[in-house]
Amino acid sequence: MNIASLFSGAKDSAFATYLSSMRHKISFLVTIISENPESYMFHTSNISLTKLQANAMQIPLVTRKTNGMKEVELNDLKNVLKELKAEGIEGVVSGGAMSNYQKSRIDKICKDLGLKHMAPLWHKDPVEILRNMIKDGFEIIMTSVGAPPLDEAWLGRKMDNKCVNDLIELNKKYGINILGEGGEFETFVLNCPMFKKKIEILDNIKHWDVKTQSGWLEIRKAELVAI
């Protein structure tokens, strides 16, 4: 099928895109840019850099802005998918693994539009998902944290097997979601098997709020380099 990927630039959407590309043609990447950093549906950390990732994959990127209001923001997603259906897409892939809120709403939008919704990570073992990403050559860094005991030191950390082991321990002790689907952390993909070039970060800055014990890594400058 010709499909569109709901693409945030983070690990789960990138991995779901990669898995789906083995069976289908990824005709478009779709990035919804929310003005609300607390959006219920859409990733916001370094979202503007999906353009660089799309260039790395040589796949057309379609972006739309939304005010990020709960439920209302779904109309913006539905409208862009309706436009892409007219361009020939037959299905949509998303990277959700556990969030019933997100999956149920994408399911409904796709049903209304006569599109197939594929969620290849849905209810898969979180540790297995992360291990497979690493095994398949995904280069991932942490770009935000929002749940103690995750702290400023995690910002910019590479997601390798040691990182996965640490997340497993934090899950046992504190209930931290291993995939970060509870908002505990967000990520950014620097390289993966779909990339023709990889992303190199040239300048970044950490924003940390001592009161909330949360923060994010702002990637201020990045470029594509040869793999």
Image (tube, rainbow, N blue to C red):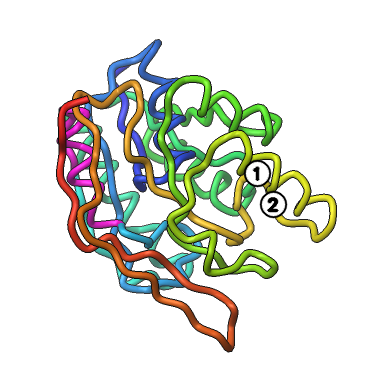
Residue matched to label 1? 98
Quadrant in which the C terminus is drawn: top left
**Callout 2 secondary element:** loop
Q: Indicate left or right for 16 with 194 as reference.
A: right
Residue matched to label 2? 177
Q: Which residues are magenta?
A: 47-61
Seen in the picture, residue 209 relative to 53 is either above or below; the reply is below
Seen in the picture, residue 188 relative to 136 is either above or below; the reply is below
Q: Indicate left or right for 105 with 83 as reference.
A: right
Label whose residue precedes the other's in the sequence (1 or 2): 1
Q: Residue at x 60, y 28 (%)?
A: 131
Q: Residue at x 39, y 12 (%)?
A: 22
Image quadrant assignment for residue 30: top left
Q: Residue at the far top: name it.
A: 23
Residue 59 shown in magenta: yes
Q: Amino acid at mark 1?
A: Met
